[in-house]
Amino acid sequence: MSVQYDLDGQKRAYEKWAPIYDKVYVKLLADGQRKAAQAAAACGPDILEVGVGTGLVLRYYPANARVTGVDLSVHMLAKAREKVRDLGLSQVRCLAAMDACNLGLPDASFDAVTVPFVITLVPDPEGALDEMRRVLRPGGEIVVASKMGAEGGFPMKVETAVAPLVAKMGWSSDFKVSRLRAWADKAGDMKVIDVQPVFPAGFFKIVRIKKTG
């Protein structure tokens, strides 16, 4: 069964966020953004960033990288292009409007795919991960930075209580690392190889998923 979702509604929401996104998130997400970019760059120079948004992560990729950034929102991408121009980010080769679940990119064309703080916003995360797997070369990695919910105990109870507030910020208490492991197991040639807590106090995590085949 195909997943139906409101792309136009998402685009309208991102249009409203574009002018203020940096002010809200630039400091809060910086540690996770930097470490996600570093993990992706360690896999090789050809990097795809899915959900590039206003381009906050782009400055963290090394000069020898070849970065393609995609996002659903043309308004977010306009902000990203300003950063590329103003900061002289020559490692950014292309910025384009695309749906994460329908990437217009060739198979096996990237050493790494970075997914910075966007996986919980995608209505069909597994569908998007399937597309990332398709464009990833064997031995490459999908690097997911996100709020990941606790798997049990008191932390899970707290997250359940604050779920409505967290949802307004674009995160999900229900999205857990176990969901990424389940997707990887089903894919067959993907494996979660590392889960790293990042600022603030492990609230966010970076999950590395390697393409083994």
Image (spheres, rainbow, N blue to C red):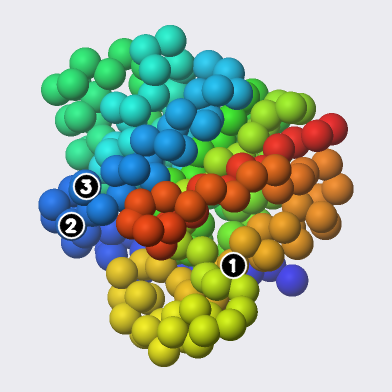
The residue type indicated by label 2 comes to Val
| Disc 3 secondary structure class | loop
- Asked if residue 174 is positioned above or below residue 144 in the image, the reply reads below
- Asked if residue 140 is positioned above or below residue 15 in the image, the reply reads above
The residue beneath circle 2 is 24
79 and 65: which one is in front?
65
Q: Quadrant of residue 67?
A: top left
Residue drawn at point x = 37 percent, y = 12 percent: 63
Q: Would you call the spot at circle 3 few (<14 residues within 10 Å), some (14-19), or many (20 or more)?
A: few
The residue beneath circle 1 is 176
59 and 6: which one is in front?
59
Give the distance between the C-alpha atoms of the residues marked 3 and 2, in whole angstroms: 6 Å
The percent position of residue 180, horizontal first and vertical second, equals 66, 58
User: Which label number is shown at residue 200?
Assistant: none
The residue beneath circle 3 is 26
Residue drawn at point x = 46 percent, y = 72 percent: 172
N-terminal label among 3 and 1: 3
Q: Are marks 3 and 1 in contact (CB under 8 Å)?
A: no
| Disc 1 secondary structure class | loop
Give the distance between the C-alpha atoms of the residues marked 2 and 1, in whole angstroms: 24 Å
Instruction: Farthest residue to the top: give it.
Output: 64
> Is 200 on the left or on the right of 140, as rendered?
left
What quarter of the picture does the C terminus occupy? top right
N-terminal label among 2 and 1: 2
Residue 24 seen in the figure? yes
> Is 202 on the left or on the right of 181, as rendered?
left
